[in-house]
Image: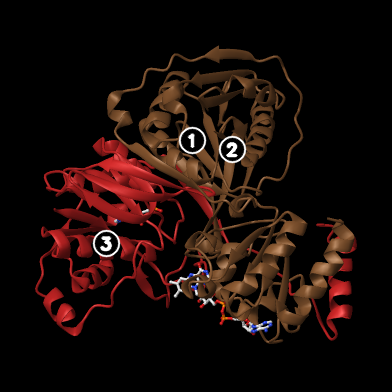
Amino acid sequence: MNIVVLIKQTFDTEAKIQLTGDGKVSDQGVNLIINPYDEFAVEEAIRIKEAKGGEVTIVSMGGDKAQEAIRQALAMGADKAVLISDPALAEVDHYVAAKVLAKALEGMEYDLILTGWVAIDDQSAQVPGRLAEILGLPQANVVTKLELEDGKAVCHREGDGAVEVLEVPLPAVITAQKGLNEPRYPSLKGIMQAKKKELKKVTLQDLGLSAEEAKAKIVGYQLPEARQAGKVVEGEPADTVRQLVEFLTKEAKVI
Amino acid sequence: MGKVFVIVEQKNGALRKATYEVLGAGRQFADQLGAEFAAVIAGQNVGGLVDEVASYGPDKIFVADDEKLANYTTGAYSDVIGKILLKEQPDYVLLSHTAVGKDLAPRLAQKLEAGLASDCTAAVVEAGELVLTKPIYAGKAFATVKSGGGTMLATFRPNALGSFTPAGSKNPEVVQVPVEIDPEALRVLIREIVEKATGRVELTEAEIIISGGRGMKGPENFAMLEEIADILGAAVGASRAAVDSGWREHSDQVGQTGKTVSPILYIAVGISGAIQHLAGMGSSKVIVAINKAPEANIFKVADFGIVGDLFQVLPVLKEELQKVVGK
Ligand SMILES: Cc1cc2nc3c(=O)[nH]c(=O)nc-3n(C[C@H](O)[C@H](O)[C@H](O)COP(=O)(O)OP(=O)(O)OC[C@H]3O[C@@H](n4cnc5c(N)ncnc54)[C@H](O)[C@@H]3O)c2cc1C
Ligand SMILES: Nc1ncnc2c1ncn2[C@@H]1O[C@H](COP(=O)(O)O)[C@@H](O)[C@H]1O
């Protein structure tokens, strides 16, 4: 069972967002991590490999720093990795990103593609569905449980107010949601071994692609207005609750 | 003349609440763009929904009715709706950012080789274009997005556009679309659908949410929140600490690695207000916090806070709300 896992390096969830002088999102002083949902995907792939054999390949598109995220995935137990890195890819939309990733997967042998369901930076949840469409593969999105039966994956997909149990023939694109597993911490041995594992770097040209126009254009970034702290009351519940209910019914008029 | 399309979402023959918003907004954007407005309804036995959809004023309604569309599957729905869109080539395609919308939209976008702005919280028409606003970094910033030229899709976060009353029917042309699904698109089988039998409104669509955190001390105490939720017609959420303690299901988690919600009223009980929690509920219209620690971070974003022991406050709150709402 060979598995490709897509990982994206993102800002730490603690990161404070600031804009640069020319109005872009600044990465100054920001810690970078593996997108948390991609960690679930990596963990799941490694567990499947441990149970059934095969190889786990990490594929990531990003800057040079993304190597750290890749090394972490290798230290967890993935076998090898490809980093697609090119200055022309610094500001691409998801249409282009999916196209580039699909091209990088060309010629690879896989039974399963695991990804996170959403990247917490741009919050788009687009790349896996687009990739599945390009590759002509079925998908199971937002999965909290994954079991393999011969030639297919049985997935629990989170719907709105319901869980769908899906039978997905392989190969397929399956996206991880929290609850799928508890990702492991890399062991010291894993970290040492990761340094020797193959990490291939490729450019757009290596993939035989050239820079492409985005289909969705970001024309600006804004920071939200800080929420103002409101009224805080303390004292006997009978009194504080009365004030709260008055606020809700008379002032905010929400009930 | 341009075209604005809305993909209607229905479940078991009833429209999803989030769909009304997108239909209402769709009519408005189409008017401002001077465009035709069309709605697409896909499902089984959905003919009965046509009148209700028509009341939101589309010029045209496409209906794809087939037993293979009885339940949502990515393959069948994207195949059928994709074919309609490929033929019609609309300028804008609008959906709700629900479990279905966020699954379907990327696949449709790729079929159309189109752009997609997902999880949008606002949109305006400016100089003949739809300008979309979407949160990034869990709402710590916003991006403004426009089409790069061709068709542009957008999914909208439930409750973000506000409520729309039906504009009134324009006696739309109703087009029955022949359904021929590519066998490749039917590869995924639904083995089972397990409905959550809470009887409460879905978290992402709820207008009122009451959430509990580690301060709730144990799973049994969430009954207090559920009772209040039933009075208010609210959904019950949780912090990650409550979920990771095994007190609530993963699907109840609000925050950066949980649900993003924007209800009209969010009540945080025994939740400290960590940055990752605020990320999921910071766009709520009104935030109320109940916490015993006056320094708790949640008070910095709350419109109204009660410093107090939740075990004393909640019973009184339940009683008072019962009086006001009278249920
Ligand atoms: C990558 C990552 C992702 C994360 N994603 C999420 C996420 O999606 N959602 C999320 O919520 N968190 C998330 N977190 C966790 C987050 O950092 C916090 O740890 C978590 O939100 C804390 O939950 P809490 O407020 O319930 O618990 P605590 O921080 O322990 O707060 C409990 C609060 O209850 C109050 N309290 C205790 N007893 C009482 C009482 N009797 N009456 C009144 N008040 C009382 C206390 O004063 C305290 O403020 C994430 C963290 C990381 C690292
Ligand atoms: N640049 C990238 N490199 C590798 N994988 C990516 C990249 N962008 C997105 N993905 C994958 O697609 C998932 C969803 O991302 P997004 O569509 O950006 O929200 C992520 O969790 C990753 O698994």
Q: Amino acid at mark 3?
A: Glu
Q: Tag on residue B152?
A: 1
In the rendered image of the structure, the colour used to display chain B is brown
In the rendered image of the structure, the colour used to display chain A is red
A17 w.r.t. B113: above or below: below
Q: Amino acid at mark 1?
A: Met
Secondary element at tag 1: strand
Q: Residue at x 85, y 85 (%)?
A: A236
How crowded is the residue under tag 2: few (<14 C-alpha within 10 Å), some, or many (20+)? many
Q: Is residue A74 left or right of residue A129?
A: left
Q: Which residue is mark 2?
A: B130
**The C terminus of chain A appears in which quarter of the rendering?**
bottom right
Q: Residue at x 68, y 87 (%)?
A: B295
Residue A22 visible here: no
Secondary element at tag 2: strand
Total labels drawn: 3
Label 2 vs label 3, nearer the camera = 3
Distance of label 3 from label 1 (alpha carbons): 34 Å
Please report, as a chain letter, where disc 2 is located.
Answer: B
Q: Which residue is mark 3?
A: A44
